[in-house]
Amino acid sequence: MNKRFFAILIVALLFVCNSALAWSGLTHNAICHIADQHLTEEAKAKRNHYLRHTLAYYASWQDEVAWSKEYAETRFWHSVQYDAKNRFQYRDGRNAITHISRIWNDMRNGGYKRLDDSTIIVNLKLLVHMVGDMHCPSHCMYDADPNPQFKRFSIFYKGKKVHWHKFWDSSASTYFHKGWTCQDYQKNLDKLSPKQIAKICKGTPEQWAKQNAKDMREPYLLLVPHTELCEMPAENIARMTEIVDLQIQRGAYRLAHVINDIFKE
């Protein structure tokens, strides 16, 4: 096996593995792009100092490193599990909420000043991805709910069998908004008033997760097992699009809120 073929194989395998972790790179980029527009001047200065790029630049960083030895544990920090009563399951820290809360609490109120730069940089990169991921419909998992209706399953997209999780991770953003770029998402979705944004950002990651647990059951009812996406009723598609847009807004505004709060003087 020559070196060039081996390199191509490794890239392909990484792509396959990474696609199983989070909703599409485009959606993550859109969330971060919107969040970038809502950073305070203080937060922008700190972002530039530590990351030397926009938030969107690191939108998929956690996916890229999750299969490395150094960051192997983070591959379990992408989702949130719930039981039949929508109670958040901690699972020994193998969830997004535990680590969003930990990083936020460690860094806010000047806490970041006690950390070395490398820790701050990694923490920011993790927040950028995890806050987005916790709002992905397929990352709200009901594994502890015995109701089979809320288990992961397969659907069909253009005649091809696609896993529920895979659809949200790779196809949802282009299915519901064909041809949109990050700028299109920002232009069309970033229209809420300061009062509406403040309402979305109110609370803690645990409270946001509880809200998601309730709201993200609806996609399981709209997109049932073995559905052919191209044959879904128009009203179902419209409602699914509303859900996607709302979750992107929530993820974007909450990400900006967390980072603004961390660097608030």
Image: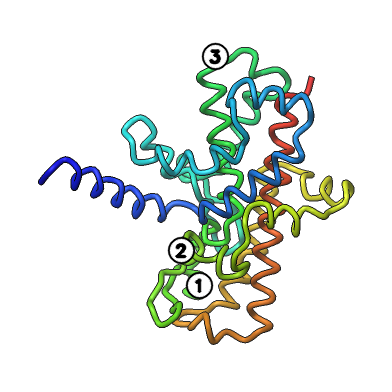
Task: Tell me the residue that label 2 is attached to.
Answer: 165
Mark number displayed over residue 147: 1
Q: Residues within 10 Å of mark 2 (few under 14, many from 20)?
A: many
Tell me which residue sits at (66%, 18%) in the image: 111
Indicate the position of residue 198 as horizontal and vertical percent values: 83, 45
Indicate the position of residue 236 as horizontal and vertical percent values: 64, 80
Indicate the position of residue 262 as horizontal and vertical percent values: 70, 27
Task: Tell me the residue that label 3 is attached to.
Answer: 116
Quadrant position of the C terminus in the picture: top right
Residue 58 quadrant: top right
Q: Secondary structure at mark 2?
A: helix
Residue type, label 1:
Asn
Q: Secondary structure at mark 1?
A: loop
Residue 40 quadrant: top right
Q: Secondary structure at mark 3?
A: loop
CA–CA distance in space, label 3 to label 2: 36 Å
194 left or right of 149 in image: right
First in sequence, mark 2 or 1: give its number.
1
67 left or right of 209 in image: left
Residue type, label 3:
Asp
| Residue 113, above or below 14 | above
First in sequence, mark 1 or 3: give its number.
3
Residue type, label 2:
His
Tell me which residue sits at (61%, 62%) in the image: 85
